Amino acid sequence: MDPHLAQVLKALQETTSGSQPQLQPQQSYDPRRIYQPDIPLPQPVQLPQTYSQPAPPAPEHIDPRTITQWPAALKYITTVVTTNPAAMERLKRMKLHQKDHEKQWWRSREAILQRHSKSSDNRMAMDSVLKSFGVSTSSAELTPEAKIQELQTYDDKVYRASVQMYASMAEDLKSLGIPFFVITEEEFSGDKDSFLEARKKVVELIDDLT
């Protein structure tokens, strides 16, 4: 073989063998790497701890029969009775009932006084008005003494009716658990006048609240 040709073939062989890619050694298969990617997993967010507020204590139950002083009665009515819709509705109806009767009694008394000052013709008209209020009258001319007696008789009638009305109202206040009306005078820490004054203040307070 021509020496020159042999050198060319040798050079080609070396060039061809040097251009072949070098295979990298294959890494061994590890199934655990499927669930272990190179990207780091996000860390769980730490939420701030919340602390629940303790429930407020239940309001202390107060027996109105144990109340014998005005400050305690005032507090009980303004914090317990006023938050009871049913009790407040009954108190409002009681107040209207009282006012209606008092107005009717006053109008009837005024009608009697007007009748006494009118002539005989006008007196007959006033008699019909008084009868509409349930007041019995006489159309005959009255002497001054008779007029006084008629007015006194009517006032006595109104007094008896008012006593009955206030007694009925006191029973209603007792059933609603209103202080000083759920106890007797003997259970009150004071004399009779103080007991009646305490009840009067309670009625005035309820009148303002309704």
Image (cartoon, rainbow, N blue to C red):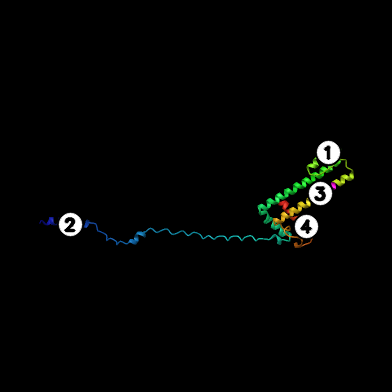
Q: CA distance from mark 2 to mark 1?
A: 155 Å
**Position of residue 24 measured from the top left corner of the image (x, y, whole percent):** 27, 60
Q: In which image quadrant can residue 171 be found?
A: bottom right
64 vs 6, nearest the viewer: 64
Please tell me whether mark 3 sits on a helix, a strand or a loop: helix
Q: Which residue is mark 1?
A: 124
Residue 157: mark in rendering: 3
User: Three-letter amino acid code at disc 4?
Assistant: Leu
Q: Compute the Cα span from label 3 to label 2.
A: 147 Å
Relative depth, front residue between 199 and 28: 199
Please name the predominant secondary structure of the magenta segment in the image. helix
Mark 3–mark 4 Cα distance, whole angstroms, equals 23 Å
What residue is rendered at 79% in x and 60% in y? 192
Instruction: Report the residue that reaches farthest toward the left.
Output: 1
The amino acid beneath tag 2 is Gln
Residue 155 magenta-drawn?
A: yes
38 with respect to 164 (left or right): left
Which residue is under mark 2? Answer: 13
- Looking at the image, tell me whether mark 1 or mark 4 is earlier in sequence order: 1
One can see residue 199 in this view: yes
- Answer with mark 1 or mark 3, whichever residue precedes in sequence: 1
Q: CA distance from mark 1 to mark 3?
A: 22 Å
Which mark's residue is nearer the viewer, 3 or 4? 3
Which of disc 1 and disc 2 is earlier in sequence? 2
**92 or 15, which lies in front?**
92
Q: Nearer the viewer, mark 3 or mark 2?
A: 3
Which of discs 2 and 1 lies nearer the camera? The answer is 1
Q: Quick one: label 3, few (<14), some, or many (20+) residues within 10 Å?
A: few
Magenta part of the protein: which range? 151-157
